Amino acid sequence: MQTVLLAGGLGSRLAEETVTIPKPMVEVGGRPIIARVMDIYSHFGHNDFVVAAGYKALLIKQFFANYHLIANNISVSVDTGKLRLVPSEPGGWNVCVVDTGSHTMTSGRIRRLRDWLNNETFMCTYSDGLGNIDINALLDFHKSHGKLATVTAVQPPARFGNIEIKGDRVCAFTEKVRTRDTWINGGYFVFEPGVLDYMVNDAEPLEQSPLTQMAKDGELMAYRHDGFWHPMDTVRDRDTLNTLCEELPPPWLRFNQEMPADMPALAI
C-alpha cells in the first residue's frame, strides 16, 4: 500500500530554516523530519512512498536520489575512486518524488497524484507531525467501517501551564493541562480512491471543502490516538522534537502503549 507524504508547503513559521530548504527537510535529531515520519510507517512494513513535493522540490529529489550515500557507510579507494556501500541499517524504502507545484494546496497535491496511486486504497499524512500511531491498527479500523476516509484524531500537546485562581488571588501554578475531550486533525489518513472525487482544484486545502464535504456525506471517520503526537509548526516545536530525539527510542517510535478501553470510534 502506498503512503502519500504531503511535502510542498512553504513552512513560513519556520522561516529561519525554510528560506533555504523546504520544511520537510528541516532536521530533527540530525535527520530531515520527513525521514522521521517515514520511520513510523516503515516500522509496520509500509515502505512504498509518494512524496507530493512543491516548494524547493529539487532539494527533496536530491535528498532521496543520494539517500543510499546518506544512510549508509562507505568505503572508498582514493586511488581509483571505487566506492562501496557498507549498510549501516536496513533500508527498503521505495520513494517517488512528484513535483505537484509550488503554490498548490494540499487537496490539489493529492489530486495531482491520481495517476500514481493505481486506483487503490492509500495512506496519507503531513511531513511535519510525529506520533506513535499504530499504523496496522489504523488500517484495521479503516477496513472495519467501510467509509471512504479515516483521519487520525489526536489531542494537541499542552503548551502552557495552568494558573489556579480563587477570587482574584493566584493560588498555584500547575503543570500543563490537556483536556481529554479536545481532538484535532493529526494527519495519518487512510483514503479510498473515491476521495479524489472530492478534490476538484489546486486551490483547495484538504482540511476545508474536501474533508468537510466527506464529513457531511458520512464518509469520514476518526481513529482516536491517545498516545504521543507532536507537530513541527514553529522553531519551539523543532527544538522540542530535537530534545526528544535524545531518548532511545524517541517517543514517536514507542508502540507498546496500551490504548484506553473506553475510546469508541468517532464519526466526524
Image: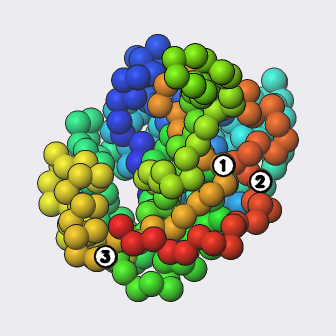
First reached walking from the N terminus: tag 2 or tag 3: 3
Q: Which residue is tagged 1?
A: 228
Query: Of 94 and 228, which appears nearest the observer?
Result: 228
Residue position marked by numbered label 2 in the rendering? 254
**Who's the residue at 68% across and 73% down the image?**
261
If you read the primary sequence from the N terminus, does the residue marked by circle 1 or circle 2 appear first? Answer: 1
- In contact (CB < 8 Å): disc 1 and disc 3: no
For label 3, count other residues whose C-alpha is less than 10 Å away and answer few (under 14), some (14-19) or many (20+). some
| Figure check: 30 above or below 142 | above
Mark 1 and mark 2: span between their CA atoms? 9 Å
Q: Amino acid at mark 3?
A: Glu
Identify the amino acid type marked 1: Phe
Q: Which mark lies nearer to you, 1 or 2?
A: 1
* CB under 8 Å between discs 1 and 2: yes
Label 2: few (<14), some (14–19) or many (≥20) C-alpha neighbours in 10 Å = some
Mark carried by residue 219: 3
- Is residue 17 visible in the rendered image? The answer is yes
User: What's the CA distance linking mark 1 and mark 3?
Assistant: 26 Å
Relative to 83, residue 79 above or below:
above
